[in-house]
Image (spheres, rainbow, N blue to C red):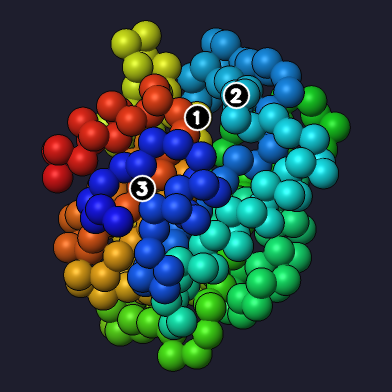
Amino acid sequence: MKLNNIYNGDCTEILNKKIKKSSIDLVFADPPYNLSGNALKWQGNKTGGDWFMVNEKWDKMSDPDYFTFTEQWIKGCHTVLKDNGSIYVCGTFHNIGEILVVLKKFGFLIKNIITWQKTNAMPNMTKRVYTHSTELIVWAVKGKKWIFNYKDLKKINPDKQKDGSEKQMRDVWNFPLVQGKERLRDKSGKAAHPTQKPEAMLERIITASSNKGDIVLDPFMGSGTTAFVAKKLKRNWIGIEKENKYIKLIKNRIKKV
């Protein structure tokens, strides 16, 4: 098992063959939401620029296949986590049901469901539903004596008491969709990865549920935010990424820390 390394391949295989059992302190997972299947786009949008719905091959599965896939990778994460380890899983109402059922199946204890309120959510194109402006992050633990750095979270919480003193971190987080200099882009100027997560989100998660020198695992490394923030916070990290096109992107990003 190599630390501070990206494994290129299927996460279910690598979790079982390359990662040592009961060796990981924290897992952050941003799995496919299984939402792709069309090519909706909104070019010339005056409020937020061109918008393209996620439409990737890796995000297309039948419902039974997606449930099986969710079982396989969560089971692998359970195996490699330490007995006091934590797992955070991103999702929306489209896949949160499968995630919760499978986490409970393998004995995880769910501690919070964090709501990410997107302060710059994309407008509703169809005008037939409420505008989707949130995603969810399930925090679950494998056993007892889990890490939760309460005081450190209070220090980085931007919300303060009326007198300016530190405030408890709540389970609703307000972040914009990644934009500006933080957004990784390809040569055409389009987002290099469609589901890049905010660095501030990972800062809270890694600060809360790991300590310096611990190992943070991301089975769907994507744009590399987990590794980038883990390195800044002096944690070791392991990434798994199936798509070759993202590997170079991640490596270049990590070099900048």
Question: Would you call the spot at circle 3 few (<14 residues within 10 Å), some (14-19), or many (20 or more)?
Answer: many
Q: Which mark is residue 239?
A: 3
Q: Looking at the picture, how far across and down is residue 81, in whole percent?
A: 45, 70
Q: Amino acid at mark 2?
A: Glu
Residue 226, visible in the rendered structure = no
x 26%, y 75%: residue:
211
* In front: label 2 or label 3: 3
Most distant residue in the front direction: 17
* In front: label 1 or label 3: 3
Residue 42 appears left or right of 98: left
**Mark 1 = which residue?**
194
> Do the numbered discs 1 and 2 sit on residues whose CB atoms are within 8 Å?
yes
* In front: label 1 or label 2: 2
The relative height of residue 81 versus residue 36 in the rendered view (above or below) is: below
x 73%, y 43%: residue:
66
> Do the numbered discs 2 and 3 sit on residues whose CB atoms are within 8 Å?
no
The relative height of residue 123 versus residue 11 in the rendered view (above or below) is: above
Q: Earlier in the sequence, mark 2 or mark 3?
A: 2
x 60%, y 62%: residue:
75
Q: Which mark is residue 56?
A: 2
Q: Secondary structure at mark 2?
A: loop
